[in-house]
Image (tube, rainbow, N blue to C red):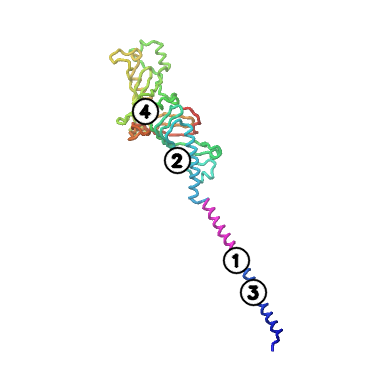
């Protein structure tokens, strides 16, 4: 017979064991939960670290990122170039600048090498209106820029000269502006110090007139701005000027001879009677004394040399003649009636960009 006290004790012991078991399970569950809680962040951290590492690697070395950085930097250079050109032009109906740059050079070098750089424009005019063109396209293969100057001062500064080529479209007015530009005055064709008098008439010439010619007065050819004609059919540019007190007509044509080398321009100069003179009248005393044929021959020679060797320098930018052709556009650059234009191929050497506010 089991006493009530014994049964109560057994029941209490059973209850205690169940409680301890439940407590143990609860503790094990909490430990398990704790372990899971601790392990999960480690896995996430590892994954996140790997993701960050991969992201960093992609940001620095991927082609897509380089293209993005290159685009931003190239755009900045392009914008600075366009702003600089606008500051130096009085009129224009279009300016664009395309810059190709190496992202590695832009990121790592203080004097990055960029290029090619292509500038295009339409209807440009200088501040004084002395230099104009219908269209221009200039391209330099390589430019080395001072990055610090560009970033801090927003200014393009070359660290070494940039070389390239350009094509300029000129109408008759533009070509007249070019020929008569003050910067070309020192290169104007000038007759040599030889005598240009008819042998039969030389004895009758006064010493004063002879000395006037020998000392060089009137021997420099003076270009006329007006009356220029560009003929597509004959491939000729006709312009005029004065020398030795007489009027002369110049026909500029292109040499197609392989033996010509770089001498692409040929100019033939012929004498013109004065507008007020009658062909039936006796020649003037000055014309009577001059050897027109000799002057025409030398003017033709030195005028051809002038075009083939011309160097137009504009505050650190040098343009040299290379070739030309006459183009007959179907539509003009400003939308009006199409006229033949003279396309001049030029060599470019940029030692420095022209200063802002330069009057030319």
Which span of residues is magenta-colored?
36-59
- Mark with earlier residue (4, 1): 1
What's the CA distance linking mark 4 and mark 1? 87 Å
In the picture as drawn, the residue positioned furthest to the left comes out as 280
* Contact check, label 2 and label 1, Cβ < 8 Å: no
Quarter where residue 339 is shown? top left
Which residue in the protein does label 2 denote?
A: 98
Label 1: element kind: helix
Q: Nearer the viewer, mark 2 or mark 3?
A: 3
- Left or right of 218: which side holds 62? right
- Mark with earlier residue (3, 4): 3
What's the CA distance linking mark 2 and mark 4? 29 Å
* Position of residue 203 measured from the top left corner of the image (x, y, whole percent): 36, 11
Residue nearest the viewer, comparing 358 with 161? 358
- Mark with earlier residue (1, 3): 3
Q: Which mark is residue 36?
A: 1
Label 4: element kind: helix
Q: Residues within 10 Å of mark 2 (few under 14, many from 20)?
A: some
* Contact check, label 2 and label 4, Cβ < 8 Å: no
Q: Nearer the viewer, mark 2 or mark 1?
A: 1
Quarter where residue 17 is shown? bottom right
What's the CA distance linking mark 3 and mark 4? 107 Å
- Mark with earlier residue (2, 3): 3
Which residue in the protein does label 4 denote?
A: 172
Which residue in the protein does label 3 denote?
A: 22
* Contact check, label 2 and label 3, Cβ < 8 Å: no
Number of marks:
4
What's the CA distance linking mark 1 and mark 3? 21 Å
Residue nearest the viewer, comparing 246 with 156? 156
Q: Say if the magenta span includes residue 110.
A: no
Above or below for 199 versus 180: above
């Amino acid at each position: 017979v089991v006493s009530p006290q014994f049964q109560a004790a057994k029941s209490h012991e059973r209850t205690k064991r169940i409680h301890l078991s439940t407590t143990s399970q609860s503790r094990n569950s909490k430990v398990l939960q704790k372990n899971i809680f601790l392990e999960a962040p480690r896995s996430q951290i590892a994954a996140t670290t790997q993701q960050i590492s991969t992201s960093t690697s992609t940001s620095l070395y991927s082609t897509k990122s380089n293209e993005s950085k290159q685009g931003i930097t190239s755009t900045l250079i392009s914008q600075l170039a366009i702003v600089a050109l606008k500051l130096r032009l009085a009129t224009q109906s279009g300016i664009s600048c395309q810059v190709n740059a190496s992202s590695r050079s832009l990121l790592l070098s203080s004097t990055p090498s960029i290029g090619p750089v292509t500038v295009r424009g339409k209807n440009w005019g200088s501040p004084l209106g002395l230099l104009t063109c219908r269209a221009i396209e200039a391209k330099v293969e390589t430019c080395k820029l001072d990055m610090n100057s560009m970033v801090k001062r927003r200014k393009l500064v070359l660290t070494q000269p940039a070389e390239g080529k350009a094509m300029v479209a000129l109408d008759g007015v533009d070509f007249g502006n070019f020929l008569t530009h003050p910067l070309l005055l020192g290169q104007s064709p000038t007759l040599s110090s030889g005598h240009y008098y008819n042998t039969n008439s030389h004895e009758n010439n006064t010493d004063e007139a002879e000395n006037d010619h020998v000392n060089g007065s009137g021997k420099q050819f003076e270009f006329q701005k007006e009356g220029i004609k560009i003929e597509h059919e004959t491939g000729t540019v006709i312009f005029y000027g004065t020398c030795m007190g007489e009027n002369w007509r110049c026909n500029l044509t292109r040499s197609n001879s392989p033996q010509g080398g770089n001498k692409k321009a040929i100019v033939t100069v012929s004498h013109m009677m004065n507008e007020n003179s009658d062909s039936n009248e006796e020649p003037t005393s000055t014309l009577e004394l001059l050897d027109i044929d000799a002057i025409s021959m030398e003017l033709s020679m030195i005028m051809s040399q002038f075009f083939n060797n011309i160097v137009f320098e504009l505050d650190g930018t040098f343009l040299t003649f290379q070739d030309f052709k006459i183009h007959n556009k179907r539509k003009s650059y400003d939308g009006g009636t199409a006229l033949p234009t003279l396309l001049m191929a030029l060599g470019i050497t940029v030692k420095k960009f022209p200063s802002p506010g330069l009057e030319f």
